[in-house]
Image (cartoon, grey):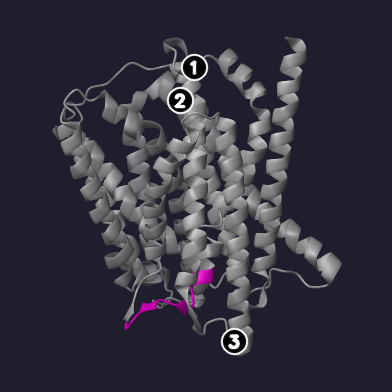
């Protein structure tokens, strides 16, 4: 039981980091004075690397380290990364670097930027290592509780409490150094707690995947990757452009201001609703049908986001705020709830479809292949995150060539983000058409061959 608790503490700390970093887009635009596309590009590249790295680390775990050592390395990297990001905020290194302590671009020097980028790199390694080894290592523990129902209730309660803390309590702390510092301290404590059980953990055997099996399955599932890449591009806008939209909207309910992290909490809750619906939908259907539903929801999500952004721009123009990017906009942030809920549906149907696809490899000799395929999908999704940064540049250049004006201006109020969301909707629709067409061709080929 003690081993189970020690390892679970790592998951709790990760939840706090997720909610603290949800506003990283606003930190980079408000404090570093980056353009919203530059900030989104940094975060999308970082998220993409975090999703691609597990493929490499999985081979390291299976061939060299095992889950225990990987958690030691990744948790240490996670701790170092969160501490470095917290220290990179202007007040904490101002005396050492001779810079000012205010949260403005003039106080962000080379040292702060170096600490930030290095810290984000360490966190990417930490996230990837946890994805690969955290849950498998929990399963290896012989002292994990037998009363599954009791533990599920307790674990769910803890998850809710941590989520509420990250979504409601943490954002009320205004100094960024403290807001990033609290999750860093919690991560350090969780890592220390994990290390105290060094000699007490149970360590299971390693499952090695055969390279020939990987190549065979990869070759037969290439058509799926197009849809997964597009899914990654759509999923990438959650913590970047959606957050940028919410930045200066009205966050009040009645007379009380509510932090935008509540949108992430709503998304998490919506996923709990969509998950059983996806299970029921896929109960008697092939995983490809679930991928089709994912792309349909993706189209709806992007169209909804485009219409919400169009409404936001109308309010901006009617109140003369186009040239005032730091002014509050008289429009409630809760218009964004619809697109966050639809994105929760996209995530749920994608995850369940991938899980059912991997369930086709339940034979004992292919169990490791099943695990690898799950991370391969995440890796291809990570490529989609990276492609999102490239797509913004390409779409901007095309819009500038054809219309004489780049859709991505330095500020969000001057940009046409709604048009970019429509482009993503078209890409999702096109990927659905390609996916269906390739599926029909494969069926036809099989019938002819048989």
Location of residue 23 by image quarter: bottom left
Tell me if 46 is positioned left or right of 408 in this view.
Answer: left
Location of residue 73 by image quarter: top left
CB contact under 8 Å: marks 2 and 1: yes
Tell me if 298 is positioned left or right of 50 in this view.
Answer: right
Bin the neighbour count of mark 2 within 10 Å (Cα to Cα): few under 14, some 14-19, many 20 and up.
some
Total numbered circles: 3
Tell me if 53 is positioned left or right of 390 in this view.
Answer: left
For the C terminus, give its image quadrant: top right
Q: Which mark is residue 371?
A: 2
Q: Which residue is mark 3?
A: 321
**Which segment is the magenta one?**
245-255
Residue 269 screen position, x and y as percent: 36, 54
Look at 64% across and 33% down and name the residue there: 224
> Is 357 placed above or below 27 here?
above
Look at 48% across and 18% down and name the residue there: 361
Residue 173 screen position, x and y as percent: 30, 71
Q: Between marks 2 and 3, how big is the CA–CA gap?
A: 51 Å
């Amino acid at each position: 039981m003690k081993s189970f608790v020690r390892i679970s503490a790592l998951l709790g700390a990760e939840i706090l980091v997720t909610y603290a970093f949800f506003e990283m887009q606003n930190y980079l635009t408000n404090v570093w004075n980056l353009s919203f596309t530059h900030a989104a590009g940094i975060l999308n590249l970082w998220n993409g690397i975090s999703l691609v790295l597990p493929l490499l680390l999985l081979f390291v775990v299976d061939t060299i380290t095992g889950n225990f050592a990987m958690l030691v390395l990744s948790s240490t990297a996670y701790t170092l990364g969160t501490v470095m990001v917290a220290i990179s905020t202007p007040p904490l290194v101002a005396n050492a670097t001779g810079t000012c302590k205010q949260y403005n671009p003039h106080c962000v020097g080379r040292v702060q930027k170096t600490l930030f980028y290095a810290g984000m790199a360490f966190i990417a390694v930490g996230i990837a290592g946890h994805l690969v080894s955290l849950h498998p290592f929990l399963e290896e523990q012989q002292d994990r509780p037998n009363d599954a129902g009791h533990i599920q209730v307790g674990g769910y309660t803890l998850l809710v409490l941590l989520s509420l803390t990250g979504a409601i309590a943490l954002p009320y702390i205004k100094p960024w150094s403290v807001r990033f510092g609290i999750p860093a301290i919690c991560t350090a404590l969780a890592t220390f707690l994990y290390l105290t059980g060094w000699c007490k953990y149970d360590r299971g055997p390693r499952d090695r995947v055969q390279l020939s099996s990987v190549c065979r399955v990869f070759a037969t599932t290439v058509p799926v990757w197009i849809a997964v890449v597009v899914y990654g591009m759509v999923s990438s806008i959650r913590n970047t452009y959606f957050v940028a939209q919410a930045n200066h909207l009205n966050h009040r309910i009645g007379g009380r201001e509510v932090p935008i992290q509540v949108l992430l909490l709503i998304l998490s809750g919506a996923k709990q609703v969509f998950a059983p619906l996806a299970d029921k939908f896929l109960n008697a259907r092939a995983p490809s049908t679930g991928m089709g539903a994912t792309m349909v929801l993706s189209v709806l999500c992007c169209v909804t986001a485009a219409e919400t952004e169009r409404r936001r721009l109308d309010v901006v123009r009617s109140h003369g705020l186009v040239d005032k990017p730091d002014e509050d906009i008289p429009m409630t942030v809760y218009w964004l709830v619809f697109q966050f809920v639809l994105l929760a549906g996209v995530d749920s149907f994608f995850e369940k479809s991938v899980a059912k696809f991997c369930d086709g490899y339940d034979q004992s000799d292919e169990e490791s292949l099943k695990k690898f395929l799950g991370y391969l999908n995440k890796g291809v999704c990570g490529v989609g995150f990276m492609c999102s940064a490239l797509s913004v540049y390409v779409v901007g250049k095309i819009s500038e060539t054809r219309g004489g004006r780049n859709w991505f201006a330095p500020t969000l109020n001057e940009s046409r983000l709604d048009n970019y969301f429509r482009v993503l909707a078209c890409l999702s629709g096109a990927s659905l058409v390609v996916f269906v067409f390739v599926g029909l061709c494969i069926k036809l080929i099989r019938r002819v061959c048989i």
